Image: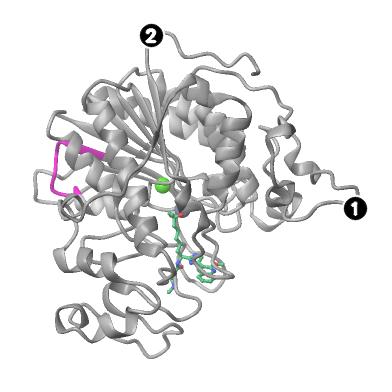
């Protein structure tokens, strides 16, 4: 199939469980786990599974998750479902974690920032526990493969949920699989570098290691006022002056690259390559975790950058060139067709393959899933017939986003 070959001299593993695809955060919620279905179909359709060891992920155990998260929070996550939520909320040790209500809150928040009201960032939905423990299990197994040297690059596109805190869900993230992975890596590796190209600040990971000089966190993100309302772009942290907890040994082991809206390929490439290379040189890590959030692409439903799949992938290639054990994780990404094209392309880069532009359509079982709509003749909507690595921008976004003069 398509002359896909295994990479020479190194090994790549792919960690995934299709059960994560069936989950729904809610009708209008931007996080769509079926973007992972699209990604999987592209990866399999191009034959990239022949270039890697593929593993079906198993759910992480509660004790594994307690390595970072609060024990009560882990219990709550393992028991919560739409039917059990109200009862669980009444249990004192859970109720104690309910955030105080603010006057103009539009959604009612329960314990640990979870909620069943519509519009919540972190809703309680059917099958939620299964979903959370599976994406975490996939990241932890990927981490094990790197630690034992059985993989040189390990991939989990369902992971990368960088906003979750010790005892609080935040920004679509419930369990911080990244923090758990880095804690495992620290058992063997002297220094771990975490790089985050999601359009949002990797605040949960940075906070977890703010006193830890053996972990350097480097996040590139949209920062500043969201629009004329004066609201800040989520989560509102990650200023350039934010460098790790001052007065502790962790000071200077966090780096933030706050970026205005509209950044293009050339500008992003300049920032990413100069800062990342200088960081690797100075910090000298023995392994790297790269969060590849695809909401930094142009045309993203939530993002405000203007970079293409080609440039997003170039970040992965750039990091790969350092030949350190590498964990590739997903994260945000809200225009599903772009997310799938990007992560499939990056799977190809990881395995040293070049994909033809034409998407192998014989493997697409449900064309409507790729486009949201099918033309009268049953053909795919044109935007998903090709990989189009340089076609993420949709004129609308370009018009919306102010170009910044660099
Ligand atoms: C339900 C239904 C929830 C529609 C949330 C966009 C929705 C958003 C929704 C949304 C939305 C955010 C805030 C909320 C400040 C908070 C995976 C009190 C159309 C890693 C998380 C962004 C990004 C959270 C996660 C952000 C990641 N933006 N429609 N919510 N308020 N939350 O701004 O980094 O990509 O938008
Ligand atoms: Ca980021
Ligand atoms: Zn994001």
**The N terminus: image quadrant:** top right
Give me the residue at 69% from left, 47% from top. Answer: 370
How many marks on residues? 2
232 displayed left or right of 393: left
Horizontal and vertical percent for residue 130?
36, 58
390 displayed left or right of 71: right
Horizontal and vertical percent for residue 286?
22, 24
Q: Nearer the viewer, residue 240 or 115?
A: 115
Look at the image and give the residue range highlighted in magenta. 209-216
Find residue 219 and report its image quarter: top left
Above/below status of 285 relative to 293: above
Give me the residue at 13% from left, 48% from top. Answer: 211
Is 211 magenta? The answer is: yes
**The C terminus: image quadrant:** top right
The disc, 1 or 2, on the residue closer to the chain's N-terminal end is: 2
Give me the residue at 55% from left, 62% from top. Answer: 30
**Extreme right residue here?**
377
Is 319 magenta? The answer is: no
Which numbered disc covers residue 9? 2
Determine which residue is flagged by label 1. 376
CA separation in Å, label 1 and label 2: 48 Å
Q: Nearer the viewer, mark 1 or mark 2?
A: 1
């Amino acid at each position: 199939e398509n002359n896909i070959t295994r990479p020479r001299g190194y090994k790549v593993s792919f960690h995934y469980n299709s059960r994560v695809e069936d989950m729904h955060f809610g009708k209008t919620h931007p996080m769509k786990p079926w973007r992972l279905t699209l990604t999987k179909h592209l990866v399999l359709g191009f034959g990239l599974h022949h270039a890697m060891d593929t593993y079906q992920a198993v759910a992480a155990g509660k004790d594994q998750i307690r390595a970072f998260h609060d024990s009560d929070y882990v219990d709550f996550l393992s028991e919560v479902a739409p039917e059990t939520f109200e009862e669980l909320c009444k249990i004192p040790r859970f109720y104690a974690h309910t955030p105080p209500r603010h006057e103009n809150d539009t959604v009612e928040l329960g314990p640990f920032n979870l909620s069943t009201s519509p519009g919540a960032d972190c809703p309680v939905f059917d099958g939620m526990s299964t979903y959370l423990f599976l994406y975490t299990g996939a990241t932890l197994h990927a981490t094990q493969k790197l630690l034992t040297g059985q993989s040189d690059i390990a991939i989990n596109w369902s992971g990368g949920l960088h906003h979750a805190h010790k005892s609080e869900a935040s920004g679509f993230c419930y369990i911080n699989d990244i923090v758990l992975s880095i804690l495992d890596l620290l058992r063997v590796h002297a220094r771990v570098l975490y790089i985050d190209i999601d359009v949002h600040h990797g605040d949960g990971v940075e906070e977890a290691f703010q006193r830890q000089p053996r972990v350097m966190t480097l996040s590139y993100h949209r920062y500043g006022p969201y629009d004329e309302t004066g609201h800040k772009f989520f989560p509102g942290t990650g200023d350039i002056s934010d460098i790790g907890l001052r007065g502790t040994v962790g000071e200077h082991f966090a780096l933030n690259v706050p970026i205005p809206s509209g950044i293009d390929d050339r500008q992003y490439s300049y920032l990413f390559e100069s800062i990342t290379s200088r960081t690797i040189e100075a910090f000298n890590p023995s392994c790297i975790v790269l969060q590849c959030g695809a909401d930094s692409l142009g045309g993203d439903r939530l993002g405000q950058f203007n970079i293409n799949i080609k440039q997003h992938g170039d970040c992965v290639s750039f990091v790969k060139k350092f030949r350190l054990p590498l964990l590739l994780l997903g994260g945000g990404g809200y225009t599903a067709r772009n997310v799938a094209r990007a992560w499939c392309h990056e799977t190809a880069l990881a395995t040293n393959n070049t994909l033809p532009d034409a998407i192998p359509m014989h493997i697409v079982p449900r064309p409507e899933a790729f486009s949201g709509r099918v033309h009268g003749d049953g053909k795919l909507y044109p935007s998903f017939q090709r990989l189009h690595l340089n076609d993420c921008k949709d004129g609308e976004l370009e018009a919306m986003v102010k170009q910044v003069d660099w």
